[in-house]
Amino acid sequence: MIRSGVGAGQVVVIMVPAGVRLVGLELATRAAGAVPLMLPDELEPRKVGALLAGVDVRLVVVDRPQRLAQVRHVALAEAELFECDDESWGRLRALGAEARLRDPELVARADAALGPASTRTVLALPRDKGSAWLFRPAASGTIRDLVADDVVLMVGRASDRFTTVVRDAHQRSGCTLAWVETPDRLAAGLAHVRPTHVTLDQPCSRVLEDLLVNARIGDAPWHEAPREVLDAAAAVAAEAKVGARTRRLAGELARLAPWWGERMRVLVVDGRISRTVTGLAAGSGLTVGRISHEPAAPLDLPVRPARPAPAQAAVPRSVAPAPAESLPQRARHELDAAFSL
């Protein structure tokens, strides 16, 4: 990033799915002093064009060319494109490792010259009434209490405010972060990393009850009547008057413990805490983490510096000038081999 000319105040638009590559690109962008920016898939291209008009976009990173359709209305003649496929990602990491070997203090020097707050990730916020905003998400609550020994499994999209504040907490605390994008991968993530904390974005929180009902341990359902067990645990947690059968059913929630793993302590859901979650926590000895989002405030990013127009011959009337809207293109100056069209 630093060798290719990405610098302080510039913007890197990252359009790759959730995972280690996005976190690596996000960290590299911040280390170079630039600002990572992520766009939700549902934001229309024309709104993206209006949102980024004049913003100093230096680099656009995509995992596949089809994603570029979202930025087709942005003037990006001064930007470069990095198509982050498997081969390019491997080359980029090798270049970074080589640079660190030659100059071990490279990142430390860059980091010492920066204010971390100025490089925090920026998101686009679609709004039903009015134009979209750029903003930096912030939140308080359980995620502020993470420490280096914690293992967090996060479910959510890259452009979601909740996953962004969890990633920021991960970077501050040094905890281990595992990340899946969709609820259908939660069970596999639990089995793979055995987390201490699970953080679920709103879409996953809304389907958590169905995930629990259909959970399997090994090749078998965790209970023959899982919904009855969850309802019984919720009733007991609410201190309702219940009979012996309901209390017995609530006690059978312990059968679900292996699904979460032996280290699981804290469940954080980005949304309303339902009676099912309350009952689950009470019956499983889990803590339900609280999180409070700060209201979004519109953010103005630095604009692209004006460049003097080069002297050129007049354009004949019969020839139309090139359109202002253009996709990222490779600059003429020297650029790392990993950054390519």
Image (tube, rainbow, N blue to C red):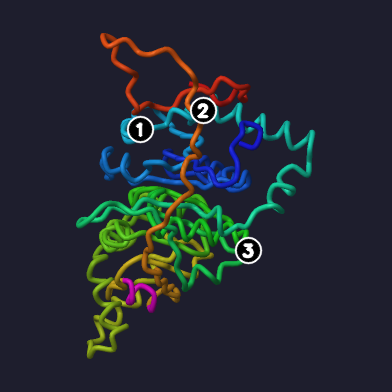
Query: Does 280 lie within the magenta span?
Result: yes
Tell me what residue is drawn at x 40 percent, y 54 percent: 155
Q: Where 280 sits versus 30, above or below?
A: below
Outermost left residue:
129
Q: Position of residue 142 (x, y in %)?
A: 48, 72
What residue would you read off at disc 2? 86
Q: Residue at x 49, y 40 (%)?
A: 12
Residue 82 seen in the current view: no
In front: label 2 or label 1: 1
The x and y percentages for residue 286 are: 44, 73
Residue tagged by mark 1? 67
- Per the image, is 256 magenta? no
Secondary structure at badge 2 equals helix
Q: Earlier in the sequence, mark 3 or mark 1?
A: 1
- Whole-percent x, y for residue 5 in the image: 61, 34
Query: Where are the magenta residues, as a range?
Result: 277-282
Find out whether the residues at labels 2 and 3 contact each other: C-beta distance under 8 Å: no
Report the front residue among 270 and 252. 270
Mark 1, residues whose alpha carbon is within 10 Å: few (<14), some, or many (≥20)?
A: some
* Mark-to-mark CA distance, 3 and 1: 36 Å
Tell me which amino acid carries mark 3.
Asp
> How would you classify the magenta stretch by its main secondary structure?
helix
Give the Cα separation between the discs numbered 2 and 1.
16 Å
Q: Which badge, 2 or 1, is on the more N-terminal residue?
A: 1
The residue identified by callout 3 is 149
Residue 250 appears left or right of 299: left
Q: Tell which of 316 and 245 is nearer to you.
A: 316
